[in-house]
Image (cartoon, rainbow, N blue to C red):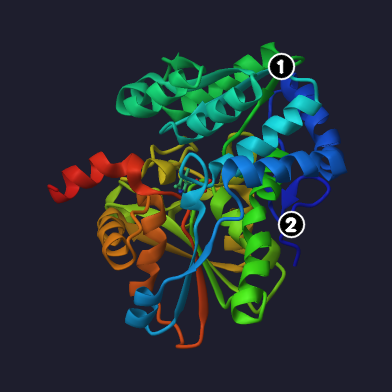
């Protein structure tokens, strides 16, 4: 079984590029150049230099002693929350902007829901002095004021999408329209392992620095490169893809993907794509997504903005169908409780997305000498208001 992308842009049954003909030229340019450019020595040198001095890599692999004692197993945290801007997303945006520069692009566009990807994109555009337009649903602009302010401070233009439900999918439509109209000077930075080929593979490769570092770090600490279990939350799936990447074909390593059950899988208010999803096309690729009987995309729900997405990337749809990964869904309530638990047991306030992953510890049991690595995808500062309201802090 192959878990990486094939030559046609598929992961098993999933992936591909289902886009309007007007986008063929843009995607072909990317497809024909991304592997060549990212393998160039000068590219790797510039990227690795910035990952070290700007992003703050390598991020630590931290042994969580109190948690390990409580659950009688060996628990490590890969600290992506310590990346500049507070989450893993910048690993991808910094890679894509260097690629865009080498393709001669002078303008960047992106879509954003909660604003996290918008901030990570605006950040690298400021770093490179490149013009930046972020598309965001009108409703999301109202709900996510601090991130809108951050993007503006960083010099980006935030362009409201006022059609449809005025949320992420409408912002995505606007970004695609922009790209069709500006194929020569503009690069579109997608924020997760979603979208038409080659985006899922390109984003996974930029995030794969996570598992590349783990191999080295774990070998230094434990004398072996591989853990027994890898656990990450999955929205679109980019932090998870980065965590799994170098272990996909290592059958000694068990892979767990954690989705948002929201108020419960059968409550009508969730984002548990693998449990509820059917094959369909979203964002230009064939994958699993939540939809009605006649194929309309269902509005997802999760208390965490980053997991509030109706699909998963095609790599994850394939990991699910082939049973390479086990998918578990966690409710808002359990995730919120774990936000407090991790804060008080380890002194680490996690993003609500990240907190979902840890709730697996209450569901599955592990052996005392198992090595488990959680991807600590982001820090909780952005979620403070949600924590305050939820727990009446
Ligand atoms: C955006 C985000 C996620 C979800 O996105 P993936 O592409 O699934 O990784 C998870 N955690 C944090 C902290 C995020 O900001």
> Does 357 appear above or below 201?
below
- For the N terminus, give its image quadrant: bottom right
Q: Which of marks 2 and 1 is nearer the N terminus?
A: 2
Is the CB atom of the residue marked by disc 1 within 8 angstroms of ligand 1's nearest atom? no
User: Mark 1 highlights which residue?
Assistant: 106
Judge the density around disc 2: few (<14), some (14-19), many (≥20) Cα neighbours within 10 Å.
some
- Name which residue lies at 54% across and 26% down: 122
Q: In this view, does 246 lie to the left or right of 323?
A: right
- Disc sitting over residue 4 in the figure: 2
The location of residue 188, given as percent across then percent down, is 65, 26
User: Which of the 4 image quadrants contains residue 316?
Assistant: bottom right
Q: Report if residue 12 is visible in the image.
A: yes
The location of residue 72, given as percent across then percent down, is 38, 85
Q: Which residue lies furthest to the front in this view?
A: 53
The location of residue 127, given as percent across then percent down, is 61, 27
- Name which residue lies at 31% across and 57% down: 335
Task: Give the structural element (helix, strand or loop) at label 2.
Answer: loop
- Name which residue lies at 68% across and 34% down: 96
Q: In this view, does 312 lie to the left or right of 362?
A: right
> Does 227 appear above or below 16?
below
The location of residue 379, given as percent across then percent down, is 40, 49
> Does 389 appear above or below 333?
above
Task: Give the structural element (helix, strand or loop) at label 1.
Answer: loop
What is the distance, in whole Å, between disc 2 and disc 1 at their CAs? 31 Å
Q: In this view, does 230 lie to the left or right of 183?
A: left
């Amino acid at each position: 079984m192959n878990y990486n992308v094939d030559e046609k842009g598929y992961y098993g049954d999933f992936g591909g590029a289902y886009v309007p003909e007007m986008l063929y030229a843009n995607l072909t340019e990317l497809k024909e150049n991304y592997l060549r450019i990212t393998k160039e020595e000068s590219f790797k040198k510039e990227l690795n230099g910035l990952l070290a001095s700007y992003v703050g890599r390598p991020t630590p692999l931290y042994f969580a002693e109190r948690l390990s004692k409580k659950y009688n197993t060996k628990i490590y945290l890969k600290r992506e929350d310590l990346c500049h801007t507070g989450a893993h997303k910048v690993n991808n945006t910094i890679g894509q902007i260097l690629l865009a520069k080498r393709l001669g692009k002078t303008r960047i566009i992106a879509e954003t829901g909660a604003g996290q990807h918008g901030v990570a994109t605006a950040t690298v555009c400021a770093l490179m002095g490149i013009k930046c337009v972020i598309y965001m649903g009108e409703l999301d602009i109202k709900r996510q004021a601090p991130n809108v302010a951050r993007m503006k401070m960083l010099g980006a233009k935030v362009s409201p999408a006022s059609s449809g439900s005025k949320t992420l999918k409408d912002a995505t439509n606007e970004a695609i329209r922009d790209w069709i109209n500006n194929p020569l000077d503009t690069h579109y930075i997608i924020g997760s392992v979603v979208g038409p080929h080659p985006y899922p593979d390109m984003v996974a490769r930029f995030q794969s620095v996570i598992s590349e570092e783990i191999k080295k770090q774990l070998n230094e600490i434990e004398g072996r490169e591989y853990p027994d279990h890898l656990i990450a939350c999955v929205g679109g799936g980019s932090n998870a893809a980065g965590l799994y990447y170098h272990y996909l074909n290592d059958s000694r390593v068990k892979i767990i993907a954690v989705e948002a059950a929201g108020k419960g899988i059968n409550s009508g208010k969730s984002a548990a794509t693998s449990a509820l999803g059917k094959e369909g096309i979203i964002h230009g690729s064939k994958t699993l997504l939540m939809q009605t009987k006649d194929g309309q995309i269902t509005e997802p729900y999760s208390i965490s903005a980053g997991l509030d997405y109706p699909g998963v990337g095609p790599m994850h749809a394939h990991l699910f169908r082939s049973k390479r990964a086990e998918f578990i869904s966690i409710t808002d309530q359990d995730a919120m409780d774990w936000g407090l638990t991790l804060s008080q047991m380890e002194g680490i306030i996690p993003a609500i997305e990240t907190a979902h992953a840890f709730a697996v510890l209450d569901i599955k049991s592990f052996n005392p000498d198992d090595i488990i690595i959680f991807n600590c995808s982001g820090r909780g500062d952005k979620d403070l208001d949600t924590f305050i309201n939820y727990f009446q802090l």
